[in-house]
Image (cartoon, grey):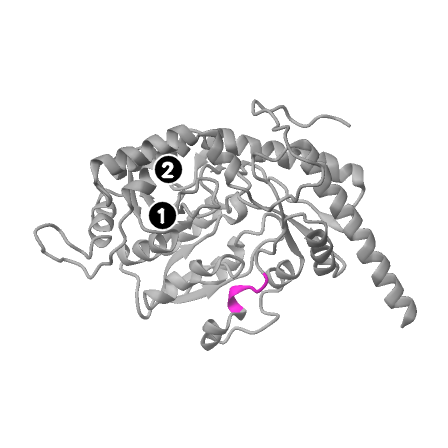
Amino acid sequence: MTKPVASTVPFPTSSSAHDPIPLIDLKPQYQSIKQEIDEAVQRVFENQTFVLGDEVSKFESEIASYCDSREAIGCASGTDALILALQALNIGPGDEVITSPFTFFATASSIERVGAKPVFVDVEENGFNINPQAISAAVTSRTKAIMPVHIFGQCAKMEEINRIATKHNLAVIEDAAQAIGSEYRGRRTGVLGTIGCFSFFPTKNLGGAGDGGMITTDDAQLATRLKRLRVHGDAGRYQHIDLGMNSRLDSLQAAVLSVKLRYLDSWTEGRQRNASWYQELFDREQLGSVIQLPKTLPDRRHVYNQYCVRVHDGLRDEVLNSLREQQIGCAVYYPQPLHLQPCFAHHGYKEGQFPISEQLSRDIMALPIFAELNLGQLERVVSGVGKAVRSAQSKSSSISKAA
């Protein structure tokens, strides 16, 4: 078997051949940097500054440097980052924001939360990101922004999206919750639009010990307003210029994340190494007619927040059940596209309106990709998928013959 692209991150070697393989396991990561994390947490307790403060300012500067943005503003969650971004851009009732239906709920709920309308358009088959041609067709006089999602850790077609935004004088809000460190044509997420929004939910590539979020921008005026909005619109001395919200990043989270940021690129390299090995192992298993692997598109740096394959021929759920029986971690991202969610029914979207997103929801299956996986575990995952596929094909064939 030909070895994939070399990595400076060595494979972990310890695990039993019979141990369950989780979809995500945060314990090995913590153990590898335990002393640094514990020291950072202890420092916060000794200083007794738990909200904003020096730890948050330091981490904001580090994120700004990492993303190459002029400003970075910490907040309480990735969802709040999206809401604050919309508020800072004065988007509200009567306005429309174009986005993807194939994403986590927070993307569209943030738009609805500020009183605007999420306008869904379909995604592309390659990469699963929003289709720029569909965006262009959806622009109306009420459109105020585009919210592309860099799904699973790979950037959307930002040059085309920004061209549409410039033509129609629209803001671009990057939902980069899954994509910190990803790149498009050499530039990192967070500086590819008007505002970038990140999540530090524990399972993200850069995950905290709780929730947290960050907003990046090159616009100094927007940054000033965002800093005000996250503290109830307070400009200082209880002068409330805006109707903001309470969304401050905790110092504990900032201290933990500051330590982990130093390791982010090596962890990303580990995820990329695992994706490369998956390609080799699946090629050997010869499942190409059923299992479609994710691809890194041109001019991208894919950071693999999730490693999502497509399972064709209607076999996805059978394969999922088999993997679970084999104690191999797997999940569906996402089982129902947002335009079909009950809370958005009043917008009038119908099944069949966005066929690619709907088909992806029937096909997609996530497999373990975290950096601490070892080669034996990856081999077990792929072998388990092969076993699951063949079993599902056998059942399907038996049903067809009986009919």
Secondary structure found at label 2: helix
Reply yes or no: does residue 3 show up in magenta: no
Horizontal arrangement in the rendering, residue 289 relative to residue 35 (left or right): right
Instruction: Residue type at mark 1: give it.
Output: Gly
Residue 9 has which mark? none
In this view, the residue in front, 137 or 222, is 222
Dominant SS of magenta comes to: loop
Residue 142, quarter of picture: bottom left
Residue 136 in sight in this render: yes
Please provide percent x and percent y for residue 23. Answer: 59, 46
Instruction: Residue type at mark 2: give it.
Output: Leu
Instruction: Provide the residue span drawn in magenta.
Output: 335-339
In the displayed structure, would residue 40 be above or below residue 238?
above
Please provide percent x and percent y for residue 273. Answer: 61, 31
Q: Which image quadrant: the C terminus?
A: bottom right
In this view, the residue in front, 16 or 130, is 16
Label 1 belongs to which residue?
Answer: 212
Seen as rendered, the residue at the extreme right is: 401
In the displayed structure, would residue 231 be above or below residue 368?
below
Residue 257 has which mark? 2
Binning the other alpha carbons within 10 Å of mark 2 as few (below 14), some (14 to 19) or many (20 upward) gives many
Cα–Cα span, label 2 and label 1: 9 Å
In the displayed structure, would residue 145 be above or below residue 219?
below
Please provide percent x and percent y for residue 249. Answer: 29, 46
User: Would you say the residues marked 2 and 1 are in contact, meaning their CB atoms lie under 8 Å apart?
Assistant: yes
Residue drawn at (79%, 48%) of the image: 387
